Amino acid sequence: MNGLALHDTPAPASWRIALPHTVAAVPVARALVRTALAELEHAADSDTAELLTAELVANAVEHTAGTGPIELVVELLPTGCRVEVHDPDPSPPGHLTVPHPVGEPDPWQEHGRGLLLIRTLSSSCGHRPTGTGKAVWFRLPVVPRQRRPA
């Protein structure tokens, strides 16, 4: 039989890249997410995906020790996208999965709002241990074509 059967779904596309453990990783990660989402016919919101990816990568660079690379994984799914950032620190990120953490971030401080953005703007988020540290992730749903900017 040629092509996909009605019950078959295409395998998700994914990208995995090692990034330097420096702030230079942030724009590279944003560009990869932008490029990956351009591949989808019904893409997730690219601006939100870039923002949340930048927050995850910046947190990994700032809050983990070492000089080894961090890893970015972007997975395109029929329902949207999933982005993971792997780092060498096994400690879970503070308050990522707490629905209403005690004390909101101070709006006058430069730092402290990244996890709030991820919790608020993603459809789901979390973290999991890996063999070399942890992975912190978020998901975004597909944005219908008529709601996307032209």
Image (cartoon, rainbow, N blue to C red):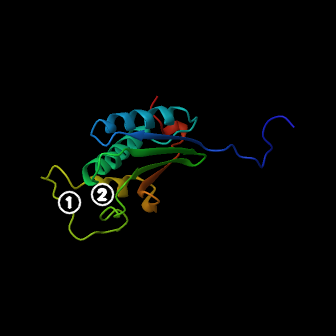
Say what secondary structure mark 1 lies in: loop
Q: What residue would you read off at disc 1?
A: 105
Residue at 54%, 37% in the rendered image: 145
User: Would you identify the image quadrant in which residue 125 lies?
Assistant: bottom left
User: Would you identify the image quadrant in which residue 30 lies?
Assistant: top left
Which kind of residue does numbered mark 1 sit on?
Pro
Mark closest to the chain's N terminus, 1 or 2 = 1
- Please provide percent x and percent y for residue 147: 48, 39
143 sits to left or right of 13? left
Characterize the local packing of mark 1: few (<14), some (14-19) or many (20 or more) Cα atoms within 10 angstroms: some
106 sits to left or right of 116? left
Characterize the local packing of mark 2: few (<14), some (14-19) or many (20 or more) Cα atoms within 10 angstroms: some
Q: Is residue 112 above or below residue 53?
A: below
Say what secondary structure mark 2 lies in: helix
- Please provide percent x and percent y for residue 62: 25, 49
Q: What residue would you read off at disc 2?
A: 116
Front position in the image: 143 or 49: 49
Direction right: furthest residue? 1
- Residue 142 is labelled as none
Residue at 52%, 37% in the rendered image: 146
Which kind of residue does numbered mark 2 sit on?
Leu
Marks 1,2: beta carbons within 8 A = yes
